[in-house]
Amino acid sequence: MNVSFDIEGIKTEDVEIVMEAIKNEQKYITLSSGELVKIANKSIEELVGIVDSISNLKVGENKISKIKALQLAQISKNIQEDLVKIDEFKDLFHKIKNREEIEPNNIKVNLFPYQKLGFNWLKNMYDIWIRRILADDMGLGKTLQTISLLNEIYQEKPKFHCINYCAKFTAL
């Protein structure tokens, strides 16, 4: 996703100074011209969050991932309102907002509550096409949660055979 960024009234060469000042929550900065400027933005927390979220943010066009866009939408109402206008994100927000807790189908093992939580998290991430890794202490059932997820995907799309996970899969 491409995001355009600029700071109104600030020269390109002063942007790094401004960004650093925002990160350090400074109230005043001196620009390269010698001009003293007060950072007087009522949404300074929003700016700090945006600057922290995107480490390589530069003036002009920036390429960011969907997950970064979603993080920015949580930080900024303005960004969220802009993203909701894009069909792809409208669907994504709808799926996130309306996700349901489900029980794994067609598997003959009872999952513990924390395993159900992990399974549902993996399933929700899969459904919105955001890839993540489930990690916790050894022996808590990540393999079982993953098998449950793969089985769930197989039940939904039998011809798919989980090719995206680089594994041959046979129904359990």
Image (cartoon, grey):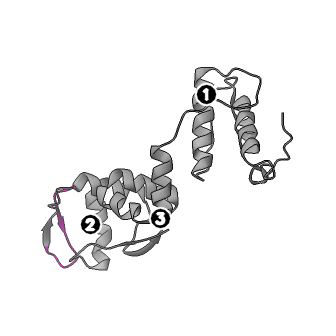
Q: Nearer the viewer, residue 14 or 68?
A: 68
Q: Confirm whether the magenta stretch covers residue 33.
A: yes
The residue at which mark 1 appears reads as 116
Badge 3: few (under 14), some or many (20 or more) residues near its Cα, within 10 Å? Answer: few
Is 111 covered by the magenta stretch?
A: no
Left or right: 139, with 17 as reference point: right
Residue drawn where x is 33% and y is 60% of the image: 81
The location of residue 70, given as percent across then percent down, is: 44, 54
Marking on residue 18 = 2
Q: In the image, which is nearer the foreground, mark 3 or mark 2?
A: 3
Which residue corresponds to the image point at 32% horizontal and 69% vertical from the top-left?
16
Asked whether residue 25 is in view, the answer is no
Could you classify mark 1 by the number of other residues whose Cα lies within 10 Å: few (under 14), some (14-19), or many (20 or more)? some
Q: Earlier in the sequence, mark 1 or mark 3?
A: 3
Q: Nearer the viewer, mark 1 or mark 3?
A: 3
Instruction: Say what amino acid the circle numbered 1 marks.
Output: Lys
Q: Amino acid at mark 2?
A: Val
**Sequence order check, earlier mark of 1 and 2:** 2
